Amino acid sequence: MSSTAAPTRPVGVDIQESETNRSVVEAIELTNVDCTVQHIPGIVRITAPGRLVITRESVEARLGREWETHEFQLAIVSYFGHIKEWDDDEIVIAWDH
Amino acid sequence: MTIAPKAPRKLTMKQRYEALTRDLDWEPSYVDKNDVFPYTEFEGIKIHDWSKWEDPFRLTVDAYTKYQAEKDKRLYAVLDGFAQSQGHLSLTDASYLNAMKLFLQGVTPLEYQAHRNFAYLARHLNGPGPRFAALCQSIDELRHTQTEIHTLSNYNKYYGGFHNYLEQHDRVWYLSVPKSFFDDAVSAGPFEFLIAIGFSFEYLLTNLLFVPFMSGASFNGDLPTMTFGFSAQSDESRHMTLGLEAIKFLLEQDEANVPIVQAWIDKWFWRGYRVTALIAQMLDYMLPRKVMSWKEAFELYFEEQMLGGLFQDLAFYGITPPRHVDDAIGEKEVLSHQVYWTLYQFSHAAAFTTTFPDVDAMSWLSENYPGTFDKIYKPLWDKEAKNLAAGGRHFARGLPQLCQVCQIPMLFTEPGDPTTLCQRDSVYNGEKFQTCSNGCQWIFEREPEKYVQAWLPVHQIYQGNCGGPTVPDVLAWYGIEEGDGGEYKGSVDNNNWNTWHNLADHSHIGSEA
Amino acid sequence: MAVKSIGMYEFPSASRQELYGDDQLVHLWFQENPWFCAAACFRAPKAMTWGDFWNALVVPFAEEDPDFDPVARRVWTLHGETFEPRDDQTLEEIGVEHKDVIGMKVLV
């Protein structure tokens, strides 16, 4: 078990597979260029080195309607990392140290 | 249909959150603050600034209730559809439900206990931020209790083992394992509870507990449980956040908190890990269609994500991986086999059934445990196969030695030697106590005053506190009925399953007298 | 006191010997026999003879093992030392105390 620095240690989120969340997943992929998307039954797992960002604007663009970041509550199944920010415009998952 | 409001907000999310939580707090003017919050000093934890507690979800009551109601609606729609369509007939096999009997009896009552203790925290933590987070979690846990009961109530119409889960949680031998785990937590102080449940259970071990059940449900046709899982998991991400914030907050408030928190991590990792022994056997033995092995789950959800991820983060504060973690890692190829072998020989006294692993199951076990299954455990099953062929069925004709701390039968083996049972001895006030492992012994010796009070089922049966001296007396006291336990083949569940699937006309299923 | 508590924290042990009257809990560890998942726990009078302990308690439990041979030569251990029980000795005389674990291994 090696000690890796915070910027590269993977963070991730598991999202429930659904029609609405398809757009959420697409938005996340566009916002995070080096993320990896994996499909396991019922779940979409998105991982990224060090930091993952979900922006309201990008989700609204894919979804075609208004979306508030609180609505992410209906999508998230699990996550690993630390929620560094959650406001009206974005959610950020990263490690602290 | 959009859930998001159309009118522009006057305040940002951060401002709204502050206005509806922290800004509603006040300094008491005619009562001493220590009298308002009398429980947050006795554990030795030092808090200098409660306002430093961060709640990243920034939920306010309006958003909370809106989204929780939506989750409930979506879940109940699925439960209704499943019930209306006789969905239980599309399970892989009735024997799958043994996993869910264990869940309802063992886990659901813990959700209720969590609800109670988080409600206590919602009153007794000094800071409004953590109080509100605890309040949301308390309501979440009550929702989980309710939704689990509703999810599984449909199966209660057709299958044994579900009908008396609450009383059984308080009385039955294997259920004292989860029960005593939570009793230990709710009888601890508020900060220890936060680290025990908020952090160790809801963050460190949560995926090991939840994902196996929910994936198991998904793979075995259990649509309601799987849907419940998704519904609850979105709450769990808030719980994980609360747990992680709890530990960081304590560590950042005062250096003196670090060794106290470390000791709690050491204790609660091990206590929680021992409870996951029930999950390990479920994953490897109770699911007709397998998801992943316990070994794989442990490696991914604990070794990789927690040791490799989280503890790297906590190292900044001087926190080290849990004491005895190496013993847990060392058990990953033997744990499930030892536990199922135990449940197999004691299910005549349980509210679930067990059975001999079939040919496919044996191959799967052999493939997934190349280092241990064929060498150590297959010989036992071969001996039992001969026993069955001769008309026998391995059921123990007595009671086992129990660990004073985890209360599991002392079925665990010495680290590094899976052929020798692990026995640890301690003496307190002139009385002997045994524990199953280095971890449980360390826990006992650290707080013996607590564990000498353990209500050990075997000892209580021998004291005559469990209905009577004979097995039938005890089973009656447990409220275990015909069809609840024993051997699966030839059981009520098994026979019904075969009847229902062989019939062309299903119109009267569930309505037989 | 190791437990941090609000006020006094002193409670009696829930399985102390006096709760069993003249009896004790006695564990029997079937060493090197994985048929039994854990050591067995019996309740037995302190004044019970080894012979009675063996015949009335141990054998009915142990004979569920298809390979159980009641007359096989065995090594017995108590408190880390081997001992040779005689049928007429009481458990108390042998030195068995409340919740003790007796080790039993068949000589191959």
Image (spheres, coloured by chain):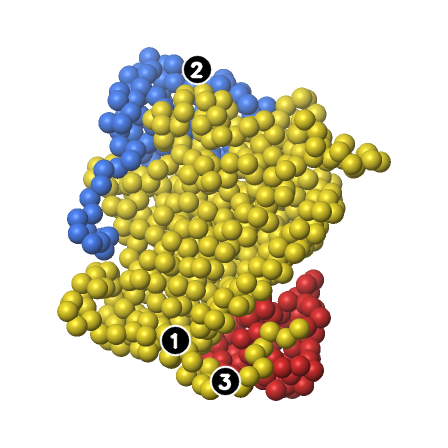
Chain colours: A red, B yellow, C blue
Circle 3: residue type:
Arg
Q: Pointers 1 and 2 in contact (CB under 8 A)?
A: no
Dot 1: what SS?
helix
- Mark nearer the N terminus (1 vs 3): 3
Instruction: Tell me where residue B420 appears, x and y as whole percent.
Output: 47, 41
| Distance between the alpha carbons at the discs numbered 1 and 2 | 72 Å
| Chain ID of residue with mark 1 | B
Q: Is residue B321 visible?
A: no
- Up/down of B255 relative to B148, above or below: below
**Same chain for the residues at labels 1 and 3, yes or no?**
yes
Residue under label 3: B9
Circle 2: residue type:
Asn
Residue at the image point whose x is 46% and y is 65% from the top: B239
Residue under label 1: B20
Residue under label 2: C55
| Distance between the alpha carbons at the discs numbered 2 and 3 | 81 Å
Q: Nearer the viewer, residue A81 or C22?
A: A81
Dot 2: what SS?
helix
Q: Which mark is residue B395?
A: none
- Report the quarter where the C terminus of chain A lies: bottom left
Circle 1: residue type:
Leu
Instruction: Tell me where residue B430 appears, x and y as whole percent.
Output: 21, 37
